[in-house]
Amino acid sequence: MSYGEHSLLVIGAATMDVQVWPRTETIESGCSNPGQIRWGWGGVARNIAENLARLGANVQFITAVGDDADGQRLLENLHEMGVDTEHALKIPERSTASYAAFHHLDGQLWVAFDDMKIIREITPGYLNRNRRLFSETEMVCIDANLSAATLKTVFRLAHQYDVPVCVDPTAVLLSHRLHPYFPEISVLTPGLAEAESLLGDSLSSEGDIVQGARRLVQLGVDLAIITLGADGLAYATPEESGRLPAFPVEVVDPAGAGDALTAAVAYALLEGVSPEEAVRLGMAAATQTILCEEIVCPYITFNGLYEWLVV
């Protein structure tokens, strides 16, 4: 286990991921095509939890997995990484959540499918029975796979114990669940499509995107970061806003970059750095991740992120 200075509680999805890339431009429907297929562990909250542990935090992780071989291996892997999974639910006769992504030849996502039904087993009652975890943590990090009722309980308990909440909206179809909680969110890290869904408006220009981050802050968010992939990010707080370009690197695999950014920003804020520096460190973590084939970079460290900030 990790015995870092900071303690965080992470709640949300943990999955078995399958990623598929074609090896040829032409795809023949109705038959087998040559490709590259890779599987591993994923889920936004799971990725955030592993990143936080690698950065040096003590991490308690609440998720739900099947009481099956996949679920057992997933939790064992997290334990090896230093994540405390004592309060992860193991559900009999249910399958561990899974996610399958199919990419274009250039690596861009074409279509994905997920089976996240088991995450509904993280109920308000379960969180209430484990409210002690909220009283003992410095920050709560969640993804939006949680049910509406469970999200409500997360924010109620966090408010009760005066604990900041960091949120990854996860997907456009899930982001609307966050509308009632903007004033309770300390850090929000949507992608562009998720930000547009949250705001109910198109962000078509660079100025629109920065203004979109400002609007999220006006709605109550303390630090809003709109991630833009290869185009960097925009961020805003009540005091400042800005636009950061991406580091000029050759992308190996973009998967997991946003999760690394979220984890690094959360950890940096607990370290007491300014929001701007936290955002820059988050960008460094995302860059470190896209240079790795793994969804969580195995050699990411908090001190190592500062090397990216040296001009």
Image: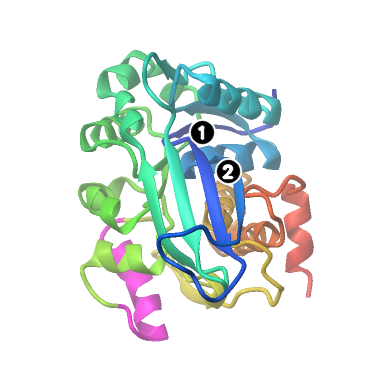
In percent of width and height, residue 137 lies at 50, 28
* Residue 237 versus residue 204 in the image, above or below: above
Q: Which residue is mark 2?
A: 270
In percent of width and height, residue 134 lies at 42, 25
* Residue 32 versus residue 91 in the image, above or below: below
Residue at (49%, 75%) from the top-left corner?
A: 242
In percent of width and height, residue 117 lies at 31, 33
Q: Which residue is mark 1?
A: 138
Residue at (52%, 57%) from the top-left corner?
A: 258
Q: How is the image coloured?
A: rainbow
Q: Quadrant of the C terminus?
A: bottom right
Residue 121 appears in which quarter of the rendering? top left
**What amino acid is found at the position of numbered circle 1 in the picture?**
Glu
Is 88 contained in the magenta span?
Answer: no
Does the image show residue 2? no
Magenta residues, start to end: 203-220
Is 207 contained in the magenta span?
Answer: yes
- The answer to which of 52 and 211 lies nearer the viewer is 52
What's the CA distance linking mark 1 and mark 2? 8 Å
Q: Which mark is residue 284?
A: none
- The answer to which of 27 and 91 lies nearer the viewer is 27
Q: Is residue 175 left or right of residue 37?
A: left
**What amino acid is found at the position of numbered circle 2 in the picture?**
Leu
Residue at (47%, 45%) from the top-left corner?
A: 44
* Residue 138 versus residue 73 in the image, above or below: below
Query: What kind of secondary structure does the magenta stretch mostly adopt?
Result: helix
- The answer to which of 227 and 254 lies nearer the viewer is 254
Q: Quadrant of the N terminus?
A: top right
The secondary element bearing badge 1 is classed as loop
- The answer to which of 224 and 23 lies nearer the viewer is 23
Does the image show residue 35? yes
